[in-house]
Amino acid sequence: QSRASQLVAGVVDPRPGERVLDLCAAPGGKTTHLAALMGAEGELVAVERHPGRARALQATCERMGATNVQVVCADATGFDGAARFDRVLLDAPCSGLGALRRRPDARWRITADAVDRLARLQRELVDAAVVLLAPGGVLVYSVCTLTAAESLAIDDHLATAHPTLVPLPAPGA
């Protein structure tokens, strides 16, 4: 994981004994970091839509000794966690344009319509995540892109569609 990716689990700040959800969880770096921060106490549900990636995620959790992780192969936009979660991490699929140093080819693969499609998916995902959040819970939305459609516009969407959510100050603010 990059240094920036490693910071995300700390922002989620899971506590031992809590119920935590990691949506779009594969390949599992953040999932296993969350599990470690929880001291393997509590429940960590890791949702991944693609069966092969879910199997790889399960293998990563086993290899890393993340015993409190339950891997679920499901579409995050329709996932029903039965009970609400104290903390939800949504590390959404994105254009990746903030990670060009690691993946310089992305600048030629990503088109404007792809960014629009991803932004629509991100709004669906964040709406689904809000529904799964317990009252007073914490939702962390994370992407590795710089496009306004995938960052600032998602903030605007949350403020408009879910006005009762209280934004937390940015880390270091």
Image (cartoon, rainbow, N blue to C red):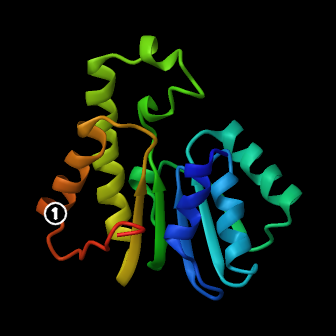
Q: Is residue 156 above or below residue 102?
A: below
Q: Residue furthest front?
A: 172
Residue at image coords 24%, 76%: 166
Quarter-of-image position of residue 47:
bottom right
Q: Is residue 75 above or below residue 103?
A: below
In this rendering, position of residue 56 left or right of residue 105: right
Position of residue 91 measured from the top left corner of the image (x, y, whole percent) = 48, 51
Q: Is residue 120 visible?
A: no
Question: At 60% from the left edge and 28% from the top edge, which residue is drawn?
Answer: 102
Residue 16, x across and y down, in percent: 65, 86
Residue ranking furthest to the bottom = 17
Assign the C terminus to one quadrant of the image: bottom left
* For residue 102, side relative to residue 137 (left or right): right
How many marks the image carries: the answer is: 1
Asked which secondary structure carries label 1, the reply is helix
Q: Is residue 20 above or below residue 30?
A: below
Dot 1, crowdedness within 10 Å: few (<14), some or many (≥20)?
some
| Residue 164, quarter of picture | bottom left
Q: Position of residue 46 (x, y in %)?
A: 61, 60
- Residue behind mark 1: 159
Amino acid type assigned to the residue bearing label 1 in the image? Ala
In-front residue for pair 147/115:
147
Q: Residue at x 60, y 84 (%)?
A: 15
Asked which quadrant contains residue 129, the reply is bottom left
Q: Position of residue 35 (x, y in %)?
A: 70, 70
Q: Is residue 66 visible?
A: yes
Side of 159 where 149 appears, left or right = right
